[in-house]
Image: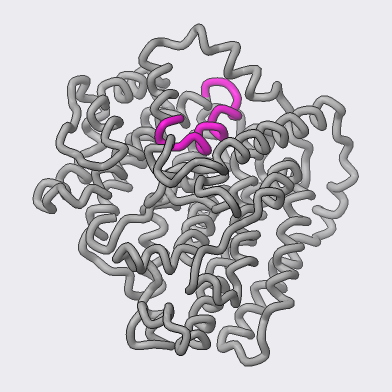
Amino acid sequence: MAGVGGKSAVSFSVLKRSFSLRGSPRSVLTGGRRSAQEGRLVARAPHPLRTHRHPAYVCFSCQDSMSETLRTCYAYLNQTSRSFAAVIQALDGELRHAVCIFYLVLRALDTVEDDMSIPLEKKVPLLQDFHTFLYQPEWSFAESREKDRQVLEDFPTISVEFRNLGQEYRDVISDICHRMGVGMAEFLEKKVSCMKEWDKYCHYVAGLVGIGLSRLFSASQLEDAEVGRDTELANSMGLFLQKTNIIRDYLEDQQEGRAFWPQEAWSQFTARLEDFSHPQHLSSALSCLNLLVTDALRHVPDVIAYLSRLRNQSVFNFCAIPQVMAIATLSACYNNPQVFQGVVKIRKGQAVTLMMQATNMCAVQSIIAQYSQEILQKVSVTDPSREKTLFILSVIREKSLSPAVLSSRAHHISPVYVSAVMLLAALSWQYLNATAGQPPGGADMHGH
């Protein structure tokens, strides 16, 4: 975001920077470099997921029936974030197109917000009124200097496909775009001071994406209405992803003149946030880091609850994979000096394993329990946040090892489902290998 620098998140982070892989400068799953719109969702009694054709078949089979403008939208999706494009194209039916347009609209909005060449007196009304441009067939913006400016210059192509969506999808996308634009305008020149404002900022740039996606899931009837109504859980999905990104990206943000760590947290340990990158302040830096990781972990019970409600396999994969990447990233960051010295990354093989495994609720619970245990083993007896960390880890352990979850592990998995999982893993490995050798800034308009 302008002012303090933007970091918004869109798959419950569509626009946010996504989880890094060792050996790859690209994102694993979701798109976006400075935005926050991706999140996900808690639980009643366990139930089997509905399985469907693998998305690769669906995508290719409907390609010829797409309008020229819709094909262009998918081209923009691949250009702005190929990683998120892969996740979107795994969704079933008309939901795929709705989420594609949702992403592009928020990407266009985020491009305005990120563009430091636009004066504030012009940027503020642009952000606040952006949702109205969806119904203006000729509106476009040719003054941006951002690398993603094509989505603004050719906005009529995106807006026409928005207007081709069903009313139930248009209402959601327009509403979230409006609320996000207002929130972005609020934080243009406002620093994240207290922990409540940290939550508010993350809500605007990521939680709203989680809420919007959840409402789209329900509107498609692939998920129950309850998923779209429970905004608290959907918001937590986005906040967990966004806070993980903010925590991990401390050094990069400092080097680029941006600051997202809340002052209420870091001021307990230092007079200046930038001091954490100096070796003599490492002890204080780690104390602040662990405090923020603990705060992010408080969203995990909501993540478990949200995911356990999902019934459609493609939606579950879309939501679960970024969440397990996040818990793995937090485990890697906790008490790790590398956060202040370089980049903390998930290894390529580890990422593929997580993608393969995170396709059912009991597996996700096991992954969460595994990484929570890793964090537990690193909690120091002298850490100022020790008691809070131990408490939230105990809550997470209770949720991940509940009798309902344990009993769900006995569910039968069909051979067709196993084949789909293996194909997903193969495609993931192919994608990660393809992106590993690309230089920063190549191919993706976001540089992921």
Residue stretch in magenta? 78-94
Is 87 in the magenta?
yes
Judged from this view, the residue extending furthest toward the top is 65
Q: Residue at x 84, y 58 (%)?
A: 403
Q: Residue at x 45, y 87 (%)?
A: 281
Q: Which SS does the magenta portion mostly show?
A: helix
**In the image shown, does 282 or 29 lie closer to the viewer?**
282
Name the image quarter holding residue 104. Answer: top left
Residue 308 visible = no
Q: Is residue 122 left or right of residue 290?
A: left
Image: 61 above or below 353: above
Q: How is the image coloured?
A: one colour
Q: Residue at x 32, y 65 (%)?
A: 258
Q: Residue at x 63, y 78 (%)?
A: 389
Q: Is residue 258 left or right of residue 49?
A: left
Q: Is residue 244 left or right of residue 447?
A: right
**In the image shown, does 322 or 280 lie closer to the viewer?**
280
Name the image quarter holding residue 273. Answer: bottom left
On the image, the x and y values in percent for residue 148 come to 31, 37
Is 344 in the magenta?
no
On the image, the x and y values in percent for residue 139 come to 18, 26
Name the quadrant of the N terminus: bottom left
Residue 319 visible = yes
Judged from this view, the residue extending furthest toward the bottom is 382
Image: 443 above or below 32: above
Image: 102 above or below 410: above
Image: 259 above or below 361: below
